[in-house]
Image (cartoon, rainbow, N blue to C red):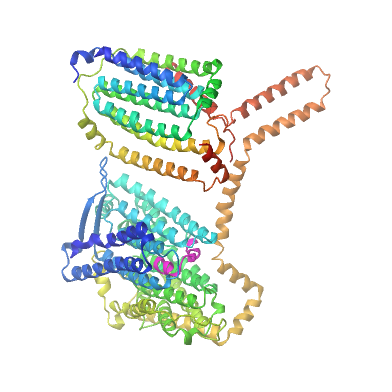
Amino acid sequence: MLSLLWLIPTLPLAGFLVLALGGKYLGHRSIAVIGTSSTALSALIAILIGMDFIAAPPPGFVFRQEAWSWIAVAGFSPGIGFYLDALSLVMVLVVTLISFLIHLYSTEFMSGDEDYARFFAYMNLFVGSMCILILADNLLFLYLGWEGVGLCSYLLIGFWYRDPANGRAARKAFIVTRIGDTAMAIGLFLLFTHLGTLDIQPLMQCAGQQWPEGEGLAILTAALLLAGAAGKSAQLPLQTWLPDAMAGPTPVSALMHAATMVTAGVYLIARTHVLFTLAPVVQHAVAVIGALTLLLAGFSALVQTDIKRVLAYSTISQIGYMFLALGVGAWSAAIFHLVTHAFFKALLFLSAGVVIMSLHEEHNIFRMGALRKKLPIVFWTFLIGSASLAALPLVTAGFYSKDLILWRAWSSAGGNPWLWAAGWGGAILTGLYIFRVVFLVFFGEARTAMPPGTARPGLRITLPLIVLAAFSLVGGWIETPPFLGNLTLFSSFVQHALPPAQAVHGEKNDETILELLAIAASLGGIALAYLLFLRYPAFLQGMMLIPAFARIREFWQSGWGFDRFYEFLFVRPYLWLAHADRRDVIDNIYKMALSCMLRWLQKVDPHDVINTIYNGLAGLCLFLHRALSATQSGQVRRYAAAIATGSIGILFIGIFA
Amino acid sequence: MEITFYLSAAIAIAATLMVITVSNATHALLYLIVSLLAVAIVFFVLGAPFAAALEIIIYAGAIMVLFVFVMMMLNLGKAAAAREQGWLNPGIWTGPGVLAALLLAELAYIFAQGGDTPWGTAAVTAKEVGIALFGPYLLGVELASLLLLAGLVGACHLGWNQAGIETGHEEERGHENG
Amino acid sequence: MRTVEAIAAIPMHHGLVLAAILFALGMIGILARRNLVFILMSIEIMLNAAGLAFVVAGARWEQADGQVMLIFILAVAAAEVSVGLALLLLLYRRFQTLDADAVSKMRG
């Protein structure tokens, strides 16, 4: 069974090829069947492989499959090889399963779109690239998947390309992540030149043996990889692209946020955790970035009016939690949260998609309301997703994973009370912002009448919602805190690939107290949302009349002004430079100097003797000016002549000097 | 064998001279093909039979056919040759001629320093070339493939624009005249 | 097949001089002609001359590298000429002329 591993990325890629090349000639039904079945089959294979892997683990809990050698040149021979261990197995299971559900949902959600085949082709490519990223056994192959994911996000964010705003959002996502990707590529070059290989496992061993802890190169490469991960996972300071990425269709957002795109950064850091352990400074930076991001994004999510933007900021914030866990060395906790987050975030986006569709493209939560009765299934699924996101105690998956992260942020070697406090504050914010959406959208009074004749969502939409809701509830029961049975199925499984986290500070009693505090935080956030947005909405409206609060609100809504800041810092100077260049600066300087000289000459008495000298000078200047502008004649042959003369001259110097 | 070398070298130079001086583009193209064939013979004499074959197949064959096609599409008549003649006033040759003379002088100086080393005694076969190409030069092959792909995409894109998407009316006229 | 005595009779620099002459003729063609078709042909001549120099050097050292470089030059020439001719057609359609000097207006 394990030998079928190569099929997992290959099937979606084959689906992409079929749909991209033959999509024109296929009907809607066959497009849907091809697009969905490719991911369904790859999910099925992933499940079978997973069962096989757990029932009869391969030696060392690692399975490798070498398909063929990619290129072999000058001692560099990256292969097309797949590597399956506990970490990549968990990732690939989550990715393929959620992708399948989202594809199933899309078959109905996108049914009215004229570019049906294009949509499924891109989606399949997206899933295939992500599977390559996860299963790659060397960093170059991983980078191929990494770039493939970036390309697909560009294509899908700009899917409705006729609206220029969507194209802008797509370009923004592509360019901002590119900054991180460039850093990552440099990191890979450094790793290769210093360690001589890019195969992940030998590379990690080599790094562990050759570099002592705190070695400069380890710090440099880890920092460069971190930049790549931050770009892909929308962490500070490269987080600005994700809220704008909402321009794509809703299933795309679900796929990007839950399974394929933003989790790539977390996976990269977990995969190369040895490097980060060798560079404690960078690892600490990971934790700090995570903590800051989760707070900033939480505040921004609190004031958004677009339902998808709330969810986008919430993703940034939750990825911040994962980075926090990675930064304190709680590798398995980060991956655990990635898994539960994938379930409830996909659920939230898909439910939000139904809400938006039923109200005919209405995104503003203040124009929704009382949808509880009209969309009962969606109400319950969205509620379950929100509860899981807000870490409602005991019953939801999000509770167990977030709790684990908070405990590790306190107790691990890299953890400290400050990081814990950030995470704790984030927990209150999470409950507050997501239940704000719940109360505004599903409770209260209807602010927009649902257009009559709106079709109820069909089975292909509700089935994925129900499955995801079930996972969002029970998904956490494989890992429970000590006072709730102390089940460690997940972490003991992942431990085969990632080192376990050690509790350094904190007693057993502390853990219980911290658990209770965390429970209080999530419940408090929800209660606060209830009070502010359902019970006493007048209070908040009154607050907004105070200019200072209104200004803070605006500031948060614009994502802490990062866009404006970058515009000011990078975009404007660059545009200015381009404009200046276009106006031919050098040419203008000559012209100005020349006109100054002529004007000065006119003042001088024309009959003066010295005047002839000045006239001569002016003539010389004029001649030089003309000679210089002659070099810009635009005539190709003159340019060629100049090149020829120059090379002959250089050859002359080379021979005789 | 020596005489073959000098003979084909003379033919190559004479044909190339004709390429750059005649006014009819089609005649120039035919002279260019003659020149390339002569160079192919030089390759053969130098013990590079594989290079000679490539020179004939790719250069004198494929690339020149491309030129022929373009020439057919342009459909340049007698008028074009006459205008060409008008451009070729004797004065135009002096500058380039001086530059070329300088270049030749410099190169001759360099060659004179090298002495007259005779070349090796064994032919380099296609097999050796292949082994070198797909051994140490593999990366170069990959790069060349990328370059050719870029050329293909570029030519395709430029060709598509001619179909009249962007240029509009000018296009139509061009088509009628051509 | 070549024989030993025939090879020894031709000094290396004769081949190089041939390459130099062809190269210089190509250069004259580029600089003197105004017709873009002729300019492209002259570029082909120069590329070919460079390839000849490589093959001569390869023959001198009995190595395959010279011919490998010729193959790369062929690839470059093929890419160059396909794009170049496509551009030439485009120019002709738009300006009704092949005069290189006529298309001197740059828009930037």
The quadrant holding residue A389 is bottom left
In the depicted view, which residue is nearer to us: A373 or A656? A373
A554 lies left or right of A469: right
Q: Is residue A621 above or below residue C14?
A: below
* Residue extent of the magenta highlight: A240-256
Magenta segment includes A243:
yes
In which quadrant of the rendered image does the N terminus of chain A lie? bottom left
In the depicted view, which residue is nearer to us: A262 or A323? A262
Q: In this view, does A528 lie above or below B83?
A: below
Q: Is residue A409 above or below residue A209?
A: below
Picture mark count: 0
Q: In this view, does C12 lie above or below C108?
A: above
In the depicted view, which residue is nearer to us: A428 or B22? B22
x, y percentage for residue A523? Answer: 44, 83
Residue A178 visible in the current orientation: yes
The quadrant holding residue A334 is bottom left
x, y percentage for residue B137? Answer: 28, 36
The quadrant holding residue A564 is bottom right
In which quadrant of the rendered image does the C terminus of chain A lie? top left
Q: Which residue is drawn at 21% across and 70% down?
A: A48
x, y percentage for residue C47? Answer: 39, 27
